[in-house]
């Protein structure tokens, strides 16, 4: 089943040189499991990051997902600047991949 929803950045921190950990609050956490992927669109909604990012942790109780990613280009450089409570429009498919669109 595909769904759209608003989600938001809860926290983000640099955990190594060019490596970031981001927690997002989303209803997708109800059905997501670690190892599934999210695809991320940047601010203008036309630039899709070329590869999905793996979900590494799910906090179902608080409705949150954690992703860890490395800054390697323009899209992930933009993502590394996101701070709470930045809001995202998310589209996800419960069986495999979630797609996240940023909003301004």
Image (cartoon, grey):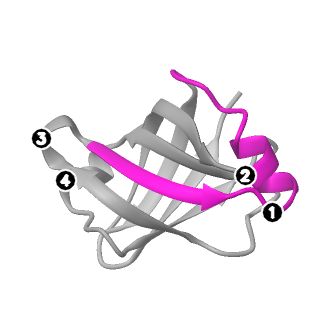
Query: How many angstroms separate mark 4 from mark 2 (CA)?
Result: 30 Å
Which numbered circle lies on residue 18? 2
CA gap, disc 2 to disc 1? 8 Å
Contact (CB < 8 A) between labels 1 and 4?
Answer: no
Q: Which residue is mark 1?
A: 72
- The foreground one among 41 and 76 is 76
| Mark 3 crowdedness (10 Å alpha carbons): few <14, some 14-19, many ≥20 | few
- In the structure shown, which secondary structural element does the residue marked by tag 3 occupy? helix
Q: Circle 4 sits on which residue?
A: 30
Farthest left residue in view: 61
Q: Quadrant of the C terminus?
A: top right
Indicate the quadrant where residue 69 lies. bottom right
For residue 21, side relative to residue 62 (left or right): right
Look at the numbered disc 1 and give the secondary structure of its residue. loop
Q: Earlier in the sequence, mark 1 or mark 4?
A: 4
Please tell me the numbered disc located at residue 61: 3
Give the magenta part as a residue range.
Answer: 64-85
Residue 77 part of the magenta segment: yes
């Amino acid at each position: 089943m595909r769904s759209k929803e608003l989600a938001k950045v809860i926290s983000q921190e640099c955990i190594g040189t060019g490596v970031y950990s981001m927690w997002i609050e989303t209803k997708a956490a109800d059905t997501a499991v670690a190892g599934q992927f999210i695809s991320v669109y940047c601010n203008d909604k036309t630039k899709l990051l070329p590869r999905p990012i793996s979900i590494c942790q799910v906090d179902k109780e608080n409705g949150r997902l954690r992703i860890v990613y490395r800054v390697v280009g323009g899209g992930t450089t933009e993502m590394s600047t996101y701070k709470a409570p930045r809001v995202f429009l998310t589209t996800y498919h419960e069986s495999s991949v979630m797609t996240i669109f940023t909003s301004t």
